[in-house]
Image (cartoon, helix red, strand yellow):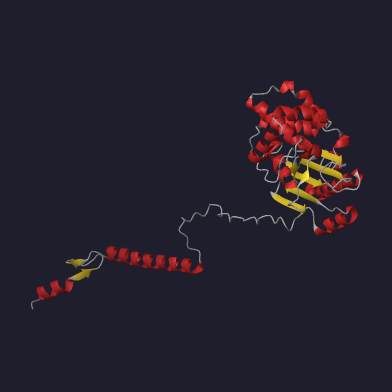
Amino acid sequence: MDRASASGAEGRRFDSFRGHVSEQRPTRATFLVRRILVFGLALLGLILILRFVSGAISSQPVDGTSAPIPVPVVTPAFDCEANSPLPQSFVDTWTTEFQPTSFNVTVVDLVEGCTYSLGDTAATFPTASTGKIIVATGVLELVAAGTLDYATVTSDMELMITESDNSAADRLFKIIGKNDAVVSIASRYGLASTTTGGAWGTIMTNSSDQALLLNQVVGTAESPLPEAQRVILRDLMSRVNPEQAWGAGPSGGIPELWTGAVKNGWYLSVEGDRPPVGLWRINTLGYVWDPNKTPRWIFTGYSNTWTTQERGISAWNSVTKQLSTSLGVR
């Protein structure tokens, strides 16, 4: 081998960055650039490994000026049972004081969407004058349909609801079609336990059905009754004679400055009536708003075994006062 051949061979090297044999020796500048790239890549790999190990690596671009990503806060579901507005301690005291025998109570917390029941939930009772809400519903449906001019029944509606006038109720009951209208309303409003009884005061129902109806005719639940007609019924029920607004209504003990839409029924059963004879039917139903017009609760109570009218009224007043100290302060 001559000197030129050896020199040429020694000058050959593998260029790892190009992937082929180079015929020229790399310059000093090229050498430095390559070394910097190698060390840079090694340093970057080390940083990535350390960030991965520490849990700091992220698929999102790193921006030192961006705000931290907020962690979603999951609010636990409201525990209806644990927060009953009618705790067992109240029920025990109430039962001892008033000695109810046959009754049912329904309370709907309109803020949390909880429903509470007391008594025999399957039992049904004659409506007495609370049946006038079904009559009013029938009248207002005719008005909404355009088949009845409200101006022609305004006076009777006022008398029937605010003063519980029976003669006005009789006239309006006839206008709506009597028992056929009751059957139709019960079906369309989902009142599964409500049946006809011959007259508006002997319609058979319970507190659960009447709470459901109340939420559809003065409340916000979807129903066949348009809002324009609900406004009329809310106004009438909010102006019931204070002497008749006990129980679930304003005179029963709702918080001051709150509004209650109420209708009550009271009747002493006599010979020839549906038993028990000689005892009072004392029924109450009401829808309550706070001063901000926020719906707060529905309370309905039915019973026909009170020995005196005063005892039945006091029993329902006691429930409303309890609701005011529980649901009224939430």
Q: In this orientation, does residue 235 appear?
A: yes
Residue 184: x and y in percent read 65, 36
Residue 167: x and y in percent read 82, 28
Q: Nearer the viewer, residue 65 or 252?
A: 252
Give the residue drawn at x 13%, y 71%. Answer: 8
Q: Nearer the viewer, residue 48 or 6?
A: 48
Residue 164: x and y in percent read 83, 32
Image quarter hosting the N terminus: bottom left
Q: Nearer the viewer, residue 40 or 177?
A: 177
Q: Give left or right: position of 145 versus 151.
A: left
Give the residue drawn at x 79%, y 46%. Answer: 301
Q: 33 above or below 167?
A: below
Q: Residue furthest bottom?
A: 1
Residue 275: x and y in percent read 83, 46
Q: Nearer the viewer, residue 145 or 72?
A: 145
Q: Residue furthest left?
A: 2
Q: Residue furthest front?
A: 272
Q: 171 above or below 15?
A: above
- Give the total number of marks visible in the rendering: 0
Q: In this orientation, does residue 259 appear?
A: no
Q: 118 above or below 203?
A: below
Give the residue drawn at x 17%, y 74%. Answer: 10
Give the residue drawn at x 14%, y 73%. Answer: 9
Q: Give left or right: position of 15 versus 52.
A: left
Q: Give left or right: position of 57 versus 92.
A: left
